[in-house]
Amino acid sequence: MATLEKIRQKGLLLSIVIGVAMLLFIVGMIDFNSIFGASRQNVAEVDGKEIKIADYERRIDEMTSFYKYEMGQNSLPDQYMEQIRQSVWNSFLKERILGEQCDKLGLKVTDKEVADNLTGDHPHPMMSQLRMFYNAEKGGFDKAVLYQMLDAINDEPDGDLAKYWAFVQRSVRDQLLEDKYTALTGASININNLDAKYAFNASRRADISFTNTPFSTIPDSAVEISLKDQKNYYKEHKNGYYRDKESRSIAYLAFDIVPSQTDYDDVKAWIENLKNEFFTSPDFISVCNQNSDESYSDVATSKAATDSDLADFAFSGKKDDTFGPQLFGKTYKMARIVESGIMAPDSAKVRHILVMENSSEKTEQVADSVLNVLASGAEFAEVAKSVSKAGTAQAGGELGWLKDGDYDKDFSSACINAAVGKPFKLTMGSAIQIIEVTEKTKPVAKVKLCVLKRDVDASSQTYAAIFNEASLYMAQNNNLEKFESAADASKGQFIRNYTVSQSDNRIADLKDSRQIIRWAFENKKGDVADKVFECGDKFVVAALKNVSEAGYPELSEVADQLNVEIRKEKKAEILMKDLKSKLESGDLAATGTVNGAEGVSQNSQYVNGIGVEPALFATVASMTPESKPAVVKGSNSVYAVKVNSVTEGTFDADAEIKNLENRRPYKYMVYKSLEEGADIKDNRITFY
């Protein structure tokens, strides 16, 4: 019994011990790496729905392929990639936010609708705007070209064409769904005669006379600002200072990565050492190709197409004449004339038929047959449509105008030198091109010029020296106060300040500066970065000057901004009182130099001599020639204004209503409202 009693007394303790043991056992079975790893896979959440980084990157890849094809480029500049990442983000937001609303309303886009808009008799307008499916002969969308692309995708389902097509399909589907939602919400908005009348009045135009007295005519010292002034202004305008995003203020110093004088001297010595061999060797083209930053192209160019630094030399000399070496900007150049006195067309208009069979014998046989058919009078375009293996087949083989050196060098050279209207064949690898030149420009003087050039870049020693200079600045100035005060203007050192949010891709014009933004959002106010950032052609050191949380800031955070606006208000009060007093005589000239402006309306975006002044434009809209001159506070000036004449049209309520309906501003207003109300968690800073 004693033992049983002891167990009862210790029962609670045993329960706790057993419970903890079981908890530890369960916890031991949990893969926390998987849990936190999963959270790290989310690039964002929209109303609780995750956007995976893999999906985000796949969309970026698809849009990149789309723009490469549409722009005809193998790679895209950095700024394009930044825009693509932002566009994918915007499309994800719209897809999730509008998608949720459409689900609630039962709005859907079926696969059949998408197919009809892609390949049906009445394709979506987007299809006719795409370069990929454009047929110059038809002047628009060509379904046959689309089918050719789909066949190519079947052969390579994971290639760039497949990504291009995935982007097109998604874009059309999203647009169809958005159109349905817009039509539904738009039907609930009624534009009446009052709306139409207001819009009509806003377009009423007036010729005015005015005087302009800038706030700056009153010195800042003449205006006192108290804490009470700040509190009152902030209370009245608090919403204007609301921050919907967290931001960071970064102070940074950039060190340009530029070649030293030693680098210039080294390149000069290097090219001078090659001068004799380049100028005298019969194999000077090989010397060029082995040493120059750019190889010799063996293309004859007109003066307009020749390197502008060398054009005068090239067209005033003869074969084997030489030039240089000479420094142009950051590039040393020397040149030798390969051939002069050439007279040839600058461009040729070309069409072609690409023949490529399963053997060289069969290819040759078909090519000869095509030439015979053309010689007998067959229409080139029709033969191209039925025989050519090129993507231009359905356009009748049309390539358009090309210059010497365009496309393949041998191809363009053959075209430039061919007779007009006489088809000929050109073997290119395992294919044969049947080519016809239909037009040529008039012959112009050309030259073949071999240019050996070398850019002067920062050497590894110079690179290291500049990096060390930046590193030393960072190490010696490892707090914000020192960082900002140590910059030496005599050495060209200037601290720049820039405010960024998590979604910003770069700081000012600094290339690859997203890395600095990421650093700023991982550190605290006052920190100086413990690394030197390489941003294109600059090394950058940075410090985190301020952290601004989302929401309403404290008055002290925006005191400087408040003072600017309060000072304007106080100056405006003084100036307006003075101008009103002077206008009691009714003479506008009493308020200053009188200027004029024509066609001012409430809808004016900009007026010469005034700029952008909505308050002034709105005041003018309510005045007539009989009205007394008015005094108006502008953005940075006070105006005295008089209306001289008014031009009004004839009000047509139905026409105005139709015009307003066509603008459909609600389309953007509704989505903007939905976006502002959505719970968006942006984690892109974790990945980019």
Image (cartoon, rainbow, N blue to C red):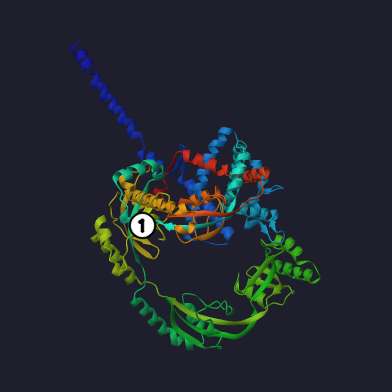
Which residue is the extreme one toward the front? 585
Q: Position of residue 528 (x, y in %)?
A: 28, 55
Q: Which residue is mark 1?
A: 218
The residue type indicated by label 1 comes to: Ile
Up the image or down, 522 lies above or below 388; here it is above
Q: Which residue corresponds to the image point at 61% horizontal and 43% vertical from the top-left?
A: 197
Up the image or down, 622 lies above or below 494; here it is above
Q: Which residue corresponds to the image point at 32% horizontal and 31% vertical from the top-left?
A: 25
Up the image or down, 433 lies above or below 268; here it is above
| Residue at disc 1, secondary structure | loop
Q: Position of residue 501 (x, y in %)?
A: 40, 49
Quadrant hosting residue 362: bottom right
Which residue is the extreme one toward the right? 376
Can residue 506 be seen here?
A: yes
Q: How many marks?
A: 1
Q: Position of residue 687 (x, y in %)?
A: 41, 49
Q: Position of residue 293 (x, y in %)?
A: 46, 75
Which residue is the extreme one toward the top? 1
Up the image or down, 323 lies above or below 559; here it is below
**The N terminus appears in which quarter of the rendering?**
top left
Which residue occupies the foreground of this view, 16 or 672?
A: 672
Can residue 109 be seen here?
A: no
Asked whether, in this view, residue 498 is left or right of residue 53, the answer is: left
Within 10 Å of disc 1 (Cα), the crowding (few <14, some 14-19, many 20+) is some
